[in-house]
Amino acid sequence: MMNPFVFHSPTRIIFGEYAASSVVDAVREVGGTKVLFVTDEFLLKSKILEPVLASLAELGTECTFVFADVPPDSEIKTVNSAAKIAVDAGCDCVVAVGGGSVLDTAKVANICISMGGHLMEYQGLNNLAERLKPLIAIPTTAGTGSEVSMVAMVKDSAESKKLLFGSRYLAPDVAILDPTLIVSLPPRLTAATGMDAVTHAIESYSSVISSSAFTEALCLQALRFLFDNLERATVDGTDIDARSATLIASTMAGVAFTNSGVGIIHALSHAVGARYNTHHGATNSIFLPHGMDFNKEVAAPRYADMARFLKLDNSGNDEKAAQALIDAVRQLTQRLRLPLRLRDMGVTDFEKEQLEELAELAATDASIMFNPREVSNDNLIDIFKRAY
């Protein structure tokens, strides 16, 4: 018997080579006249954004206000700075082009632009009562799924923790998937962001609380695209077919996890990322097999489904098939030449007090509630030690 579920997919998705060069059409369709354009300094200085900015120029002079001061791990003051520019200029639409940090910055800034007040008033889940101003998201990485998700995270540097914002009104109105924007993404980032998408798909499919036939279908196809194309895209960034497949897979996994949640792996990664500023996708790739090992006790049938769909195992033994998927994840990470241990990312050795603090952060992370197996702080500490 199927569990009851609610499935949201509020974002209009546009895919195609050079699709971002027609962004002005999307702005006009959502009624935008003055745009806050959010990106990062590297992208702004590159030639990647030239077609996008040229398209926005059709709105007229002084109708696009650029905010490019987004760090790799966005934080509260970044959001406030972006929101101030938009409010002062009277912007009625937000366009964000970049990776997860840029897109999350734009999403949370849009709360302040639309609702007023301090962003902490809206922190948490379902604290928005009405639609926000139109937001168009254009990803330049294939991994976060932020262009379609109903959640965003920014860092509270003072408290060294991640803040979660979640609401159906937070999802972008339009996502433009343009594979030409990611062909120059370096191999290491291609691999790391791709493993973020792999983690989204596996954790979403394993979320027995809120997964559905819709999310399961998205997760399985996303995994097939990623296992078939992520290594190709990493080795040859100009392989537009591989790039397209990973970009679509990332968005599919994004739609899935924003409906069914993630789990222990994201909770662990959020804790380490907040304390040590590690790259989220690379951190997920380290924790992924360890979290799967922990969950296998209850999630073996779900892992077996994925393994059989990917043709990793054709036996009728769920335990064997589940292990085949875990082994395949480890092998993919190795082939992508991503770090396998936290120490390889520069994380210093954990003291007892640090482990307890990290475990508490992970235990209180919203992701943990969707994990298929109950988790104790001792379990979390054990996984931190194994991953180190």
Image: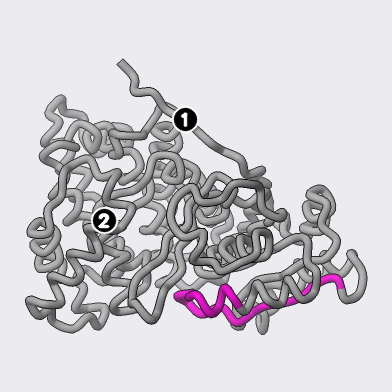
x and y, in percent, of residue 339 in the image: 26, 71
Q: Answer with the quarter of the image where residue 282 lies.
A: bottom left
Numbered label attached to residue 265: 2
x and y, in percent, of residue 310 in the image: 32, 38
x and y, in percent, of residue 111 in the image: 61, 60
Q: Few, some or many C-alpha atoms within 10 Å of disc 1 (few <14, some 14-19, many ≥20)?
A: few
**Residue sitting nearer the eye, 163 or 283:** 163
x and y, in percent, of residue 144 in the image: 46, 58
* Quadrant holding the C terminus: bottom left
**Residue sitting nearer the eye, 338 or 253:** 253
Q: Residue furthest right?
A: 60
Q: Few, some or many C-alpha atoms within 10 Å of disc 2 (few <14, some 14-19, many ≥20)?
A: many
Numbered label attached to residue 6: 1
For mark 1, give the secondary structure: loop
Q: Residue furthest top?
A: 1
The question of residue 298 being in magenta is answered with no
